[in-house]
Image: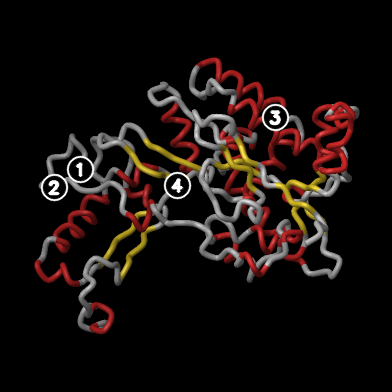
């Protein structure tokens, strides 16, 4: 192969992958029983034998094991098997696969009007490139169906929406060391689109996150508010908070995240005629708008949250005129700083301990002179 593809393997950048062998669903060659022979042993032994050859340093051939199960990260020789395997230490995560970066296919800021950020074709550009790549072959509803399946997970008991769906929406923080944390994190990574950031050297603890993906957050909102899921999920969340698995910070950050985003969800579903997607006037499928990403007027939103007479109590009603043209658009809350927070319809959770400011929700002033 190396001789036939001489131009591919020639070059000075030896550390960059030039040829990748990908094995999907690789967990089938690594059974859970520790004393069984694993077919992965022969494969890994062959990979290692080739990788230590002098000439292999110039080839940069990578082998990728992909799976929905974390067992693919442990292809060590079973303890009960008397083979001739050689244990060799090394990195557990490599930059191309844990520092992927996001928004590779997002629209340029200058290319989309501030009032058009809710369009499906714009929103799917944020986060992992999977969603944008589906635009060429699928319509909006088909893409939503795929995202729903991936977020729900194929192994959910009785097809119930899992608690990890709330992590996608509200940035739930987990207590490191809690006996249920590892199971929760493993489930989120394997079946519910959570992303691994890093792990401890002994591989006992993993640090994960959900990237800022408004499209997936809209799907999560639909799952949370469908049928009787909301009541059940909030009860499950309460149970995990009481047990200490989920952190409630002293400043009330979790409570306020739940309040503002649930208020937005309920406003959209109770006050406005709710449809997950509003078809575009010109009939173009990907210019349809996701309702959970659309702008809503601040005046009406605050009346919904605080009561109909709220504005009359604020400086004798003078603030009502000032906010009459203001709108907000939030579909998720994220911890990370982002240049595109309005275009991705994202509110920002500030660092804990920061005085005066806890969250930032971008406001758009419509038809502002100048």
* SS of the residue under disc 2: loop
Disc 2 marks which residue?
A: 85
Task: Identify the image quadrant of residue 58.
Answer: bottom left
Q: Earlier in the sequence, mark 4 or mark 3?
A: 4
Between circles 4 and 3, the one closer to the viewer is 3
Q: Position of residue 207 (x, y in %)?
A: 40, 38
Residue 215 visible from this viewpoint: no
Q: Looking at the image, is 238 positioned above or below residue 148?
A: above
Marks 3 and 2 in Cβ contact (< 8 Å) = no
Q: CA distance from mark 2 to mark 4?
A: 26 Å
Q: Residue tagged by mark 3?
A: 259
The relative height of residue 61 versus residue 89 in the rendered view (above or below) is below
| Lower position in the chain sequence, tag 2 or tag 4 | 4
Gap between marks 4 and 3, in whole Å?
33 Å
Q: CA distance from mark 1 to mark 4?
A: 21 Å
**Horizontal relation, residue 92 to residue 136: left or right:** left
Nearer-the-camera pick, 257 or 124: 257
Residue at the spot of label 1 = 77
Q: Is residue 193 left or right of residue 62?
A: right
Mark 3 or 2 closer to N-term?
Answer: 2
Q: Are marks 1 and 4 in contact (CB under 8 Å)?
A: no
């Amino acid at each position: 192969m190396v001789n036939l593809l001489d131009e591919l393997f020639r070059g000075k950048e030896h550390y960059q992958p030039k040829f990748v062998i990908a094995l999907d669903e690789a967990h089938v060659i690594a059974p859970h029983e520790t004393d069984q022979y694993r077919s992965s042993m022969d494969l890994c032994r062959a990979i290692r034998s080739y990788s230590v050859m002098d000439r292999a340093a110039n080839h940069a051939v990578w082998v990728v094991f992909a799976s929905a199960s974390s067992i693919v990260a442990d292809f060590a020789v079973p303890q009960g098997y008397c083979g001739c395997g050689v244990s060799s230490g090394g990195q557990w995560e490599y930059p191309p696969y844990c520092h992927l970066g996001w928004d590779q296919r997002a629209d340029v800021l200058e290319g989309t009007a501030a009032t058009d950020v809710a369009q499906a074709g714009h929103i799917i550009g944020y986060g992992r490139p999977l969603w944008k790549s589906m635009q060429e072959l699928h319509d909006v509803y088909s893409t939503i169906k795929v995202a729903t399946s991936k977020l729900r997970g194929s192994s959910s008991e009785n097809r119930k929406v899992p608690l990890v769906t709330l992590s996608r929406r509200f940035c739930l923080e987990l207590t490191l060391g809690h006996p249920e944390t590892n199971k929760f994190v493993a489930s989120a990574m394997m079946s519910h689109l959570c992303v691994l950031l890093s792990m401890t050297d002994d591989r006992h603890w993993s640090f994960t996150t959900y990237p800022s993906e408004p499209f997936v957050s809209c799907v999560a909102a639909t799952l949370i508010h469908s049928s009787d899921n909301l009541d059940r999920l909030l009860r499950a969340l309460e149970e995990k908070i009481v047990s200490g698995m989920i952190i409630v910070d002293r400043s009330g950050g979790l409570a306020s995240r739940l309040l503002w985003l649930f208020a937005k969800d309920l406003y959209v579903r109770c006050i406005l005629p709710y449809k997950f997607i509003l078809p575009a006037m010109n009939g173009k499928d990907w210019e349809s708008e996701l309702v959970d990403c659309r702008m809503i007027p601040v005046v009406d939103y605050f009346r919904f949250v605080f009561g109909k007479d709220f504005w009359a109590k604020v400086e004798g009603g003078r603030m009502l005129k000032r906010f009459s043209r203001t709108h907000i658009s939030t579909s998720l809350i994220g911890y990370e700083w982002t240049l595109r927070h309005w275009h991705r319809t994202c509110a920002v959770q500030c660092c804990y301990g920061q005085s005066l400011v806890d969250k930032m929700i971008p406001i758009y002033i419509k038809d502002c002179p100048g």
